[in-house]
Structures are given as C-alpha cells and as structure tokens.
Amino acid sequence: MNTERLDQAFATLAGSSAGSGQGLETFRDWLLSSDALQRIRINPYEVAAAYGRPLDEIVGIALDGVGSGLFDLHWLVHCPHCNMITEERENFFELTQTSGCKM
C-alpha cells in the first residue's frame, strides 16, 4: 500500500470530512492494519466496532472518501433467502426493481 498517497488523501479528507480527527486517524490505522481482502469490501460496522468509534462517523468518512476518489462505491443486491449476490452495480441508478436468484 502506498502510505504517502494514503496520507495525502487523508490530509485532503481532514479539510472536508464531517468525521473527527480521531475518526480519520482510526480509519487510516484500520486501512494500514487490514489485509487486502478486508479492503476489497470495507465493512464500516467492522471498522467502528474494532476501534470503538461511532458507526455514523465511520460511514461519513467512507462516503467522503468516495467523493474524494479515495474509495469506489459499489451496490450489491443480495437474495433475501440465501444471501447470494444477485446483482452488482457501480451506480445506484443502474439498479433494477427486481433481481433473480439462480439458487
């Protein structure tokens, strides 16, 4: 992981994020200590619980990170019966009203 680029991104976030300085530091620390699989699909619940931070703060920081280009946001549709991912989109407005599960 390029820590110099990460530090620059978090410095930019510090000026525009609704999160506290401690929340930003917590999120950065989590990114540095997490493995690649955890970073593929960041779970704000996991980050907040691991560091005892408010969930809304971590979600806000993550969304601010999407806006600044630090993270990508993808929408996943899960089957309510088997929890299989039935659809994935990069744009919320590309989602359909219905989705079918192959299971």
Image: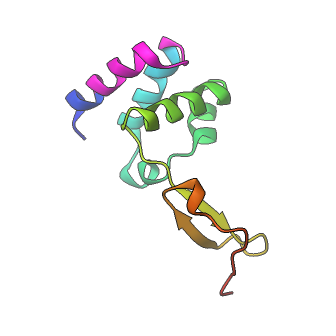
From the image, give the main secondary structure of the stretch colored magenta.
Answer: helix
Picture coordinates of residue 75 (x, y %)?
A: 57, 57
Identify whether 79 is placed above or below 46: below
Q: Residue at x 56, y 62 (%)?
A: 94
Q: Residue at x 34, y 20 (%)?
A: 12
Q: Is residue 100 left or right of residue 87?
A: right
* In the foreground, 21 or 32: 21
User: Which residue is outermost to the bottom?
Assistant: 102
Query: Which residue range is magenta in the image?
Result: 7-21
Q: Quadrant of the N terminus?
A: top left
Identify whether 34 is placed above or below 15: below
Colour mode? rainbow
In the figure, residue 3 lies in which quadrant?
A: top left
Q: Is residue 14 left or right of residue 8?
A: right
Picture coordinates of residue 10 (x, y %)?
A: 36, 23
- Is 20 included in the stretch rendered in magenta? yes
Identify whether 71 is placed above or below 18: below
In the figure, residue 96 lies in which quadrant?
A: bottom right
Q: Quadrant of the C terminus?
A: bottom right
Q: Is residue 90 left or right of residue 2?
A: right
* In the foreground, 17 or 5: 17
- Is 92 included in the stretch rendered in magenta? no
| Figure disc tally | 0
User: Which residue is outermost to the right?
Assistant: 81
Picture coordinates of residue 53 (x, y %)?
A: 62, 24
Q: Residue at x 68, y 81 (%)?
A: 101
Picture coordinates of residue 43 (x, y %)?
A: 57, 45
Q: Residue at x 28, y 24 (%)?
A: 7
* In the foreground, 71 or 84: 71
